[in-house]
Amino acid sequence: MEIKNLIGFYSVGVTYLQYFCRRKRDCLTVYTNQFYSKMNDNKSYLEQMRLTYRPKLPVTLRCPVRAIEGEPTQSVADQEAIKALFPSTYGMPELTFERDDSAMPPEKPFNVGVILSGGQAPGGHNVICGLYDGIKALNKYCRLYGFLGGPNGLVKHRYIELTGDMIEEYRNTGGFDLIGSGRTKLEKPEQFEAGLEILRELKITAVVIIGGDDSNTNAAVLAEYYKAHDAGVQIIGVPKTIDGDLKNEHIEISFGFDTATKVYSELIGNVARDCNSAKKYWHFMKLMGRSASHIALECALQTRPNYCIISEEVEARNMTLHNIAEEIADIVVKRHDMGMDYGTVLVPEGIVEFVPTMKKLIAELNEMLTKYPDIPRLRDMDQNNFVREHLSEENRAIYDSLPDDVARQLTLDRDEHGNVMVSQIESERLLSRMVAHVLDMRIEAGEIEPIKFKTQHHFFGYEGRASYPSNFDADYCYSLGYNASHLIYVGATGYMSAITHLGRKAQDWVACGVPITMMMNIERRAGKDKPVIRKALVDLEGAPFKHFVENRDQWALETCYIYPGPIQFFGPEELVDKTSYTLFFEQFGKE
């Protein structure tokens, strides 16, 4: 009887279990089908969710505005030379927008062109979305045209009209694939005139150029030409670069920096966690940033590596590559003595150009390549002999001390601005090799016991350039684009769209316009003196660097790694809207 009851209860239980599992399976099937039906739209579920995000705008951009003029400006250096090159746009005042309920919308619609220039940076699409929404808010009949493939699209008359349906597909997305980008320099009258032909054909009266320091220099040149020739075309720039070197008191941060450094910090944190788990490798990680170490510094603040090179400090201390290798070797030895034969090292991409001795060598090589442009196409031995014969004695000694592969990389073709293509120089491998050599010499001299020094190498670059923009960059870029529409409305040209007080909540940000010429100086490029926007280097007296210095000795010897994880788009405000450490320290000092 008991056995029958047991069997009966078992049968009922199995029946209910089967029913429950069938219900759960049906629910799971419905959920799965819904999920995969969304996937059939060629968009990930996250991308579809991000399309629905509505960026936050400063209060002053949500209403009619008027421009308040500040004092006349001048360039950061070489004032007479810059003024002579930009007589029509030099000395213009800064502009700040404030609410003006009496402001009237434009009576007639106007057409605007937009160009993405240079390398990708997260948030570029949101600049275009903000610009589109901004001009449509002024007059719903305004039209926006995108020039394809960068500045060359303007010159070659390649364009598309950007419609509302197209814009909706790219809100809060990464990359520049809506219209593409390019690195064509706009510097010749025939280019300006070719561009003017299509602008007049499309009745475009304003062009917004989204780019870095060189691209915005092009914007200033174009603005000067069109204003001097009374062409009736306004030129507005937007500050873009993940490197963070396009900044000043008015441009507090370039867009894309926040997102890219968060992406890199996630990767660094993942490597550090693996390092702390395996406990057998020293990881040398090279990061983007050829002209400044803002990325390396920000990522160090986010992840706390055992060693981080700041190129600007290397130059200030007159260090050599050997000096850097010695410092890293010291940390390797101390951690070994503590039982830790592992660690993390961050290397900025442009380190070789900041080492004073290397800087002199590269400057001479640049002049040599300008004079003899066929050097990169010589056979290895012929090239080496030719270069050695034409170098000064001091620089020849430095050149001869380099490994053959590094010496070869220094004589490759330059980029379009005449710079060494430092991303091709494997400085992370060079430094780990030099550290290994220093350790071998110390072991051979009997100064230290044998050490296990096993290395892994990484280069984090393109991984951060086209990511989904963080909420900060999504908001910031949308505001920059919307602000550009106001600069067009007030008739500005030769200005850069700027949003300040970025450490505050988005609604409290301040919208303004900054004359591009006030950021310029004269620099030597490809053997010639040229006007360019001055790059902003890491401030060795600034709060971010000082915080790093105060803590790096502890981070060197202790395993203090932080693992930031991926960018968060949903959740509490303090998580999803968090700004970079650099911006926080610059505006508020210490934590």
Image (cartoon, rainbow, N blue to C red):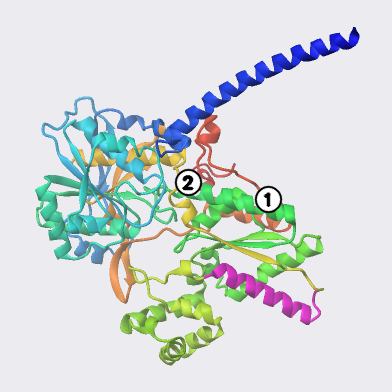
Q: Residue furthest top?
A: 1
Q: Name the spot of residue 128 as percent of width and height, x first.
A: 30, 42
Q: Is residue 186 left or right of residue 57?
A: left
Q: At x 46% / y 56%, what residue is drawn?
A: 462
Dot 2 corresponds to which residue? Answer: 259
- Compared with 91, 24 (above or below) is above
**Looking at the image, residue 355 lies above or below residue 113:** below
Image position of 515 (left or right of 559): left
In the image, residue 440 lies in the stretch drawn in magenta: yes
Crowd class of label 2 (few under 14; some 14 to 19; many from 20; radius 10 Å): many
Provide the residue designation for mark 1: 273
- Residue at 77% x, 14% y: name it: 11
Quadrant location of residue 105? top left
Mark 2 residue type: Thr
Q: The residue tagged with tag 1: helix, strand or loop?
A: helix
Q: For the magenta stretch, what is the residue range?
A: 426-448
Residue 48 seen in render:
yes
The C terminus: image quadrant = top right
Q: Residue 536, image x and y in percent?
A: 42, 58
Query: At which x and y percent is residue 547?
Result: 60, 51
Asked if residue 538 is positioned above or below residue 373 in the image, the reply reads above
